[in-house]
Amino acid sequence: MTGRRRKAAPVRGYGITRWSRAFVCVVEAGADHRHITGARRYFRDRHVDDLSIGEGTITSSVRGSQLDPFDVIVRTRSVDADTVVGLLRTTGEVDDLLALARGEQPAGLGSLIAPTESADVESSCTCPDEAPRCIHVLATAFEVAAEIDRRPTTLLQVMGTDLPSLLAAAGGGPESAADDASTDDALPEDFYGDTVVLPPPPPFPAVDALTELEPAALRTALRASGVPATQLAEAFDDLATFYAELKRRT
């Protein structure tokens, strides 16, 4: 009797889009390699339950190393809709609101909405870990980042506002945004885009190579290269130094 081969679970991702990466970078600031790696494993294995994203407040329940799950609360500094729209007018980027209504992530609006420093995001967890960002907080942030990848307006909600509030501050409502967006559906004169000049590709974000590697696989590779088991910690430190120097030079 032959057993059925189990279908592999789909690979999950986060931080794919610009706004999502901006949110993740701020939350990860100050977190060490061990916490980030563990949080990625929790995200991949779907340890985060009951995720709730409200205006400026995120809550979740994360299954960890104990029998009972840990409760996570993340609070962000709220943005003011009138201030954001005023700055968009100053830079001539009010049309970013229409781009967002079409599902895009305009850079100008993102720079005004997204958190920029660790103090913009406060977090707490019922776990005993006293690190600035525990595994459960980080895993929750990764789930939120995945939601931002799927639906850009999630970032507005995370930061305490929404698209209707921004449109109202700009002097238009959701209906006018929908009407303006619909006009863009008209076929252009150059339908096949023969004369369209494509924009340059986006810059590739800097990646911390060590946080992308599974510790077990890295240990196996180091042992296979001849590093004794007693010197693995020193080899990890050397790799971290080398990667830090490579990032500095690039």
Image (spheres, helix red, strand yellow):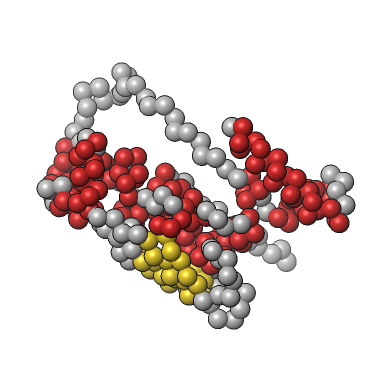
Q: Residue at x 58, y 66 (%)?
A: 131
Q: Residue at x 65, y 41 (%)?
A: 244
**Quarter of the picture holding the C terminus:** top right
Residue 220: x %, y % from top left: 79, 52
Residue 173: x %, y % from top left: 13, 51
Image-based side of 211 in relation to 117, left or right: right
Q: Residue at x 43, y 64 (%)?
A: 122
**Quarter of the picture holding the N terminus:** bottom right
Image-based side of 87 in relation to 75, left or right: left
Query: In the image, is residue 38 above or below residue 183?
Result: below
Taking the view exactly as shown, the residue that stands out farthest to the bottom is 67
Image-based side of 172 in relation to 17, left or right: left
Residue 49: x %, y % from top left: 47, 71
Residue 158: x %, y % from top left: 35, 59
From this viewpoint, is residue 104 visible?
no
**Closest to the observer: 70 or 197?**
70
Q: Residue at x 43, y 70 (%)?
A: 73
